[in-house]
Amino acid sequence: MKSCRVLLLSALLSFSLSACVSTGSTSSPTSGGGSGVSYGDSKAVETVTTDLGSTDIQMTAEKMTISMLQHPLLQDIIRRRGLLMASPVENKTSEYFDTKLITDTILTQLQKNGVRYVIAGDEMQNQTDELIRQNQSGLYKKSSTAKVGNMQGAQYRIDGSVSSIVKRSASVKDVYYKINMRLIEIESGIVEWSDEKEIRKTLNR
């Protein structure tokens, strides 16, 4: 049953990604009435620049999600209703992009397959503010407020990094990306799973 779930996810993600590769979509974007703005296919291959783009995020999330779900530990975590969290992915490249897009996409796909996760440390302020508001503002019945001290800690956390090597000549720009992800047991610090995704993008001037 578990293997069927992983195979189904793989098929669904591969199908959605195959739509990215196709450039001959029969549906035309919806235009904004002469404003110059139009809707495009969010799954279409993005080749505007050599920077890390939406297609790269989708391919990375697909690979990492399937790889994790195929690991016996993830199936055990699902069975035990264990908890994960995601630390920020470290951006080691010279360009700016929101690395949270990677972990958010992975966590969303994992949750659809039964994995539970808690908010990360950098998102904790909103949580604590709400607890304080319910317990100290005097606006709520005591019987209905969320009690302080009942938040649950994760047993495992996902982290990772994005690195790049850029080579240039007069006519060519070549960028090599390596995206590494890990699943770490928080109590022991043991890396239980790791995988990587390599991407090469070339621009001919």
Image (spheres, rainbow, N blue to C red):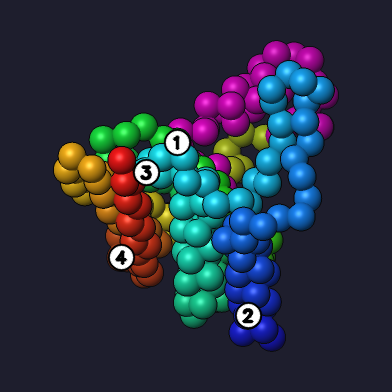
- Pointer 1 residue: 98
Numbered badge on residue 7:
2
- Give the mark nearer the N terminus: 3 vs 1: 3
Residue 149 in the image: above or below residue 107: above
Of the numbered discs 4 and 3, the one sitting upstream in the chain is 3
Q: Residue at x 60, y 22 (%)?
A: 129
What quarter of the picture does the C terminus occupy?
Answer: top left
Q: Pointer 3 and pointer 1: residues touching (CB < 8 Å)? A: no
- On screen, residue 45 versus residue 98, left or right, reads right
Identify which amino acid the numbered label 2 is placed on: Leu
Work out whether mark 4 precedes mark 2 in sequence or the reverse, and give the earlier one: 2
The answer to if 123 sits in the magenta stretch is yes
In this rendered view, identify the residue nearer to me: 62 or 127: 62
Q: Quadrant of residue 6?
A: bottom right
Q: Secondary structure at mark 1?
A: loop
Q: Comparing marks 4 and 3, which lies closer to the viewer?
A: 3
Residue type, label 1: Asp
| Residue 139 shows in the view | yes
Q: Is residue 142 above or below residue 63?
A: above
Q: Quadrant of residue 76?
A: bottom right
Q: Amino acid at mark 3?
A: Thr
Q: Earlier in the sequence, mark 4 or mark 1?
A: 1
Q: Are marks 4 and 1 in contact (CB under 8 Å)?
A: no
Between marks 3 and 1 in the image, the one whose residue lies nearer the viewer: 3
Provide the residue designation for mark 4: 190
Magenta stretch: helix, strand or loop mostly:
helix
Question: For mark 3, what is the residue?
Answer: 50
Tell me where residue 29 appears, x and y as whole percent. 75, 40
Q: Magenta residues?
A: 118-146
